[in-house]
Amino acid sequence: MFRVHSVAPALTLVALTAVAALGACHHPPPHHPGEEYLEAIRFEGNKAISSKNLQEGLALMRAEKQGAAPDPYLVTVDGERVKGMYLRHGYLEIDVHSRVERHGDAAVVIYKIEEGPLSTTRVVINGLPDKDKDLSVDDVRKKLPLVDGKPFNYELYDQAKEPLIGVVQDAGYAHASLDSRVIADRANHQAVVELTYDTGPKCHFGSVDVVGVPDELRDAVIARLAIQKGQQFSTSAIAQTQRNLYDMRRFSTVRVLPDKTDGEEVNVKISLAQSAPHEVSVGGGFGMDPATYEVRGRFGYNVTGWPTPLTDFDLDLRPAYAMLRDNTGYEPRIRALGKFTRIDLFRPFMAGEVEGGYNYLVYEAFTSFGPRARLALKSPIFTPRLTAAVGWEFQYLGFRRISPLIDPTLEHDLHLDQTERLGEYTQAVALDLRDNPLETTQGLYTEVRVSEGGPYAAGGLSFLQVTPEARGYLPIFGNVIAARVRAGGIFGDVPPSERYYSGGSTSQRGFSERRLSPTVSGDVMGTFTSIPFGGARLFETNFEVRREVTKIRGMGLGGVAFLDGGDVTESTAQLNLGHLHWAAGLGARLFTLVGAVRLDFGYRLNRTGPTEPEPGSHFAFHLSIGEAY
């Protein structure tokens, strides 16, 4: 069986989205004399919620757009919708009155709002078992993001209902139920959140029956179960088991079904359905970078369970044909990589990789070409959120088409006058505490990467490279505050392929891609040109405020404001953290099925003189997919 995927270019996706958005805009039909029509919807007395926000979702908005008369029933229904919006924001004493004013054929629907005071929160919890070390009132309160004496919010209350029952079930109470309600205490202007539990008996897991698994995978499946006979019942163990089995990439369906009919013992049935072992992806597109314009192709092939049941094979072929932006000719590009991945190597969740391939790549200062190989071992440590990886990499690269701006002395200093035999050992440790790696709203991510190159790793250059990074995310009043800091240093010999570059959509957005770097400038064929060649020290810092503003055809549309700083230098002495390159800017995000389509505009705030990277340039635009970090 095969699965075939087509990869659409990002620019095409953006164009289709723009057409869809434009298609949503239209003008109301003309009005005929004698026919009543809804001219406007207005609000009186609203202070806590804007009229624009109150209008969103009203059924009468459609009548207004179509030029139709207001339906009396919908006038009443929308009044309840407005009231419901205030209730969700904690205004439990809200009162809404509607009226229709007519001026000739035009009708105006007016909602008079008496907001009343914002209710504060009081939480009452009943029914929890006494003296259970696995469950306390504090455990339940941690799942409810409402604080006694602080403003009440219905949305936070609704979102907490599932975690509120989950925390009790995770403590072993498989039959637990929750009766939750909000009582308006108008005398004290309070919203009383009453949580009444019926926990039932404390339970443990009974038999675990796995069906649908082939014999050659059964041992690996059993080793990934987070459920054992006699273990205290836990919904989190059920969810973790499902994630562990999906992560094997062998099953299209994983159903973990607890049977709660036998009192204190909960038997579990796990039903698996194998997925198609072969997957093919084909795509192409057009792109550009500071050095070239290029036409790109891509072919990918993946087969799971080959050549052994726990081994996967991936082939990634990316040919391209590039036109050099300095008008000096055309260049082919190719990246061809084949990789074998062995899951559950030595123990569950440990993966080993063997990779080999060939690269022919065009950069601003030179073209590199040659084979590469990599061995890697990756495993979680104690928890899936903490992972470690070790490996060995080897590249044998030649260099051609070296820029005429790079004189023989600089060419020698950059090791471009010889073939690069790069052998290095690599280590990495990452801690991922984010709520969602793709669209993060809160959490922390930290990572440290270290490489050692030298003759002991079959390399011709001896160096130590250290690159730490930290990211943080915090939700505040509907916004997400995101920050990142990244540093790097190469000590000893500096291989051309390992040099640091900054600038672009994921680093310093005041610069074009890779343009924040040590640079050589001069005249090339009558044109003043600046060529980045990379550095040995790097520092980047980013700060941005993200907010979803509205929706277009079901897709979220958001905006960001950001401040980026950074620099890349040849030495530590040249890296001045008090005098970084700074850029501020704004961006838009369209949240699609393939990720956030991102358009950013960055404006450089300082260091734009003739001796700086990308001299004279004050701003840059970036179109990409996925968040910056």
Image: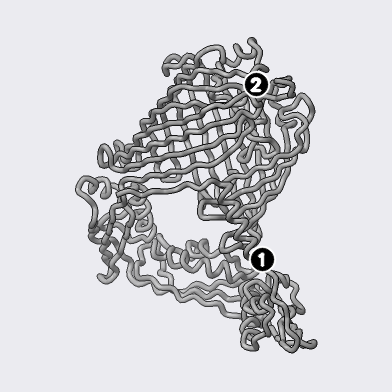
Q: How is the image coloured?
A: one colour
x then y, percent, for residue 501: 61, 29
- Could you tell me which residue is drawn at 43 percent across and 26 percent down? 358
Q: Quadrant of the C terminus?
A: top right
Q: Nearer the viewer, residue 33 or 581?
A: 33
Task: Check disc 2: other Cα within 10 Å, few if <14, some if 14-19, many if 20+.
Answer: some
- The answer to which of marks 1 and 2 sits earlier in the sequence is 1
Q: Secondary structure at mark 1?
A: loop
Q: Residue furthest left?
A: 215
x then y, percent, for residue 379: 39, 38
Q: Nearer the viewer, residue 407 or 53?
A: 407
Q: Is residue 194 left or right of residue 119?
A: left
> In terms of image quadrants, where is residue 80?
bottom right
Q: Amino acid at mark 1?
A: Cys
Mark sitting on residue 25: 1
Q: Nearer the viewer, residue 527 or 99?
A: 527
- Could you tell me which residue is drawn at 64 percent across and 51 percent down? 481
Mark sitting on residue 298: none
> In terms of image quadrants, where is residue 292?
top right
x then y, percent, for residue 441: 57, 53
Residue at numbered disc 2: 570
Q: Secondary structure at mark 2?
A: loop
